[in-house]
Image: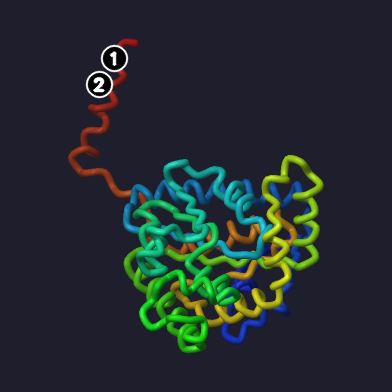
Amino acid sequence: MEKINTNTYKVEEGFNLSQRATYQDFGASEKELKKELKSIRKDLGEFQDTMYAHGKYGVLVCLQGMDTAGKDSLIREVFKDFNARGVVVHSFKVPTPLELRHDYLWRHYIALPERGKFSVFNRTHYENVLVTKVHPEYILGENIPGVESVSDIDDAFWEKRYRQINDFEKHVAENGTVIFKFFLHLSKEEQRQRLLRRIHLKRKNWKFSPGDLEERKLWDNYQKCYEEALNKTSKEHAPWFVVPADNKEAARVIVASVMLEALKKYKDIEEPELDDKIKANLETFKQELEKETP
């Protein structure tokens, strides 16, 4: 299996989405990729245990992608070896009436990870510069002062949103949240095949929605919006990684590798030392327990 260079997936200035590959296999079979993922996710699970004991950092994992990009299965497979209490998944759908009575970042802010835990956003605050940019009429439901019609939603409006999102992420990063943002880059043809599978396979029928076909017609619009958002919001404290998603096994290995490589750089994350008094009496405690009769 070829060595993975995680930096090749990081979004740098002048990023062009159309020039990024949607398929990768590292010269490995499906079995080999699954074995590699198993090893990495075990290390990630152990890291989260240490991070929980350390108690000063949380990790936010943001997943974006077109319909059928594989976000759900990626979450299931990458975090399989985590303590169930160590990772919380949030799937953000259409805002509820309560959520619409707050600013658009509110529901994401209250879902941020506790110190010691991972939070996974399955679709994220970026929907507010993606789906709403393709469908600007959705913005009117937010009841924002000064926005009375779609004509009020101009370039300056979107620039302000990018700034607000960057400020939000910088704030949480400066307060102990490690941020990873992954765009699962799917080809249009692979999406077509996955949508067909949802129709052909009875057990997957429930996943299919006619609305998926309507959004598919807007593919080019979405790609343009993604490229702009990735360029404007990939920062050192919250970088974007564009992950080839046509091969699900390889995509999972890339995401897991990016996280583990970056988290290993946090040398201050380690299990706390025992209190000196407790440490000095460990032998006594051990003998006390060993003397107990079953």
Would you call the spot at circle 2 few (<14 residues within 10 Å), some (14-19), or many (20 or more)?
few
Q: In the current view of this chain or complex, which residue is farthest to the left? A: 277
Residue type highlighted by circle 1: Glu
Residue type highlighted by circle 2: Glu
Q: Is residue 294 left or right of residue 235?
A: left
- Residue at 75% x, 61% y is 191
- Residue at 46% x, 65% y is 179
Q: Is residue 174 left or right of residue 281?
A: right
Q: What sort of colour scheme is used for the picture?
A: rainbow
Residue located beneath label 2 in the image: 288
Q: In the current view of this chain or complex, which residue is farthest to the front? A: 148
How many numbered callouts? Answer: 2
What's the mark number on residue 118? none
The answer to whether marks 1 and 2 mark residues whose Cβ atoms lie closer than 8 Å is yes
Q: Nearer the viewer, residue 8 or 252?
A: 252
In the rendered image, which quarter is residue 56 located in? bottom left
**x and y percentages locating residue 141 in the rendered image:** 46, 69
- Residue at 66% x, 82% y is 16
**x and y percentages locating residue 246 in the rendered image:** 74, 61
**x and y percentages locating residue 281 in the rendered image:** 21, 33
Q: Is residue 24 visible?
A: yes
Residue located beneath label 1 in the image: 292
Query: Quick one: quadrant of the C terminus?
Result: top left
Query: Quick one: quadrant of the N terminus?
Result: bottom right
